[in-house]
Image (cartoon, helix red, strand yellow):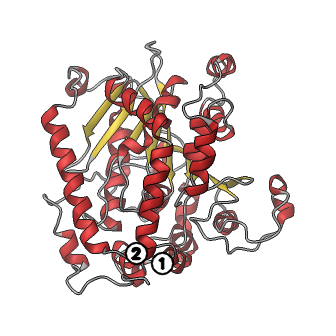
Amino acid sequence: METMSSLPASFPSVDSINEMAEEKETDTLVRVSSFPLNQQRRRRVGYKSPSFASRPRRQQSFGHAAAETYLLTRLSFKLLSYLGVGYRWMTRLLALAVYATLLMPGFLQVAFSYFFSSQVRRSIVYGDQPRNRLDLYLPTNNDDDLKPVVIFVTGGAWIIGYKAWGSFLGLQLAERDIIVACLDYRNFPQGTISDMVNDVSQGIEFVCNNIIEFGGDPNKIYLMGQSAGAHISSCALFQQAVKESRDESISWSVSQINAYFGLSGGYNLLKLVDHFHNRGLYRSIFLSIMEGEKELETFSPEKIIQNPNSIDAVSLLPRIILFHGTADYSIPSDARVNYKNYPNILGITRNPPHNITFVNTLQRVGAQADLILYQGKTHTDLFLQDPLRGGKDELFDYLVGFVHAGDKEALARDAMAPPRRRYVPEILLRLAGRVSPF
């Protein structure tokens, strides 16, 4: 029998949750006139700021690592006290533990590279909050050419997201001469959805305005999010476009983003509440994360773009490309679609992933949007099991090819790259797929 279907009476309000942050967040904004409002990209900057150019590389100290570990541990125990011992939630937690154990051979190899590789710059500060940190993954190719940049926002159900979850993607893209910036952000209960979106927006601002100091090309920046990270990053992008269309003060421009990649994300929260409740993320908790039922539309990109007051923001958006597995049960499959428009998903006869409706909505209002569906792939196949399997990876190859499009030398190097090695035996990957709680 389920023992937890609502939060305890002592559960804090949204206001009290926001007060958990240790320091008040401040935003330094510049006038919108400093950014182009059309689809042209920023001019390349040909100098380096002395404050960054002369700064020696700083490795994360043991003291900082201990403080960060303490922060995550404290938040985990606080979260446990809120969640209680609900049957659904506990079974998901147990499945997650087994899933992680099966994939541990790969995780340990990636963790070793994350902590000891000279190409990883960990915990670069981008804001005032304790979780305002990012990791940079730098290519081994040290030529003078500026590198394309992918800003990546990790998932984690808005509760257990952490920048290191993107380390495998960061390391592998860095091998293909692409800089990756993995953003950390406040999770619940340390913050709610507006805090998460603000953190990610501030991280994007930092990368857009400073990445040249690390060898990144400010004219080739791409934004990507996975799962909850796809939702948060798309909110940051869409809200920024709306602000920009209204001539509000902004600290970065959507014109600086060449394309947006959304991996296994959900973009209409109104369709997710009941689904998540049935899977263990109880309604009361989810609504607390999203700051109440009235705010679900505010933080639903599909609804943002349908708002007549946001129509001027559409022309500012970069190209949007969504990736989704057809066997993804973490995101509800409740849409109906004309399959003639999606010839690459033959074999599916009903209940396609709901972000087909999001893409259709984007296209209807005039945005550039595409959806790539992967037959039989689950919520974690595209991001974890397939990369750990090694060899050819359609999603990875697509990302690299898209980022390097137009660069003949980079494409030639990609064609000569050796096959990616396997990290986890196939039998463990198959077992992990069976027990995955996602």
Disc 2 vs disc 1: which is toward the camera?
1
Which class describes the residues within 10 Å of circle 2: few (<14), some (14-19), or many (20+)? many
Whether residue 398 sits left or right of residue 179 in the image: it is: right
Q: Is residue 208 above or below residue 95?
A: above
Q: Amino acid at mark 2?
A: Phe
Horizontal and vertical percent position of residue 376: 72, 54
- In-image side of 16 versus 345 (left or right): left
Please report the residue visible at 42 percent of the width from the left and 37 percent of the height from the top.
167
Q: Residue furthest bottom?
A: 9
Q: Secondary structure at mark 1?
A: helix
Q: Is residue 406 above or below residue 168?
A: above
Tell which of 183 and 76 is nearer to you.
Answer: 76
Residue 292: name its quadrant.
bottom left
Residue 437 vertical placement versus 113 (above, below): below
**Residue that badge 1 annotates:** 277
Residue topped by disc 2: 286
State how many labels appear: 2
Q: Is residue 24 left or right of residue 305?
A: left
Circle 1: is it few (<14), some (14-19), or many (20+) Cα within 10 Å? some
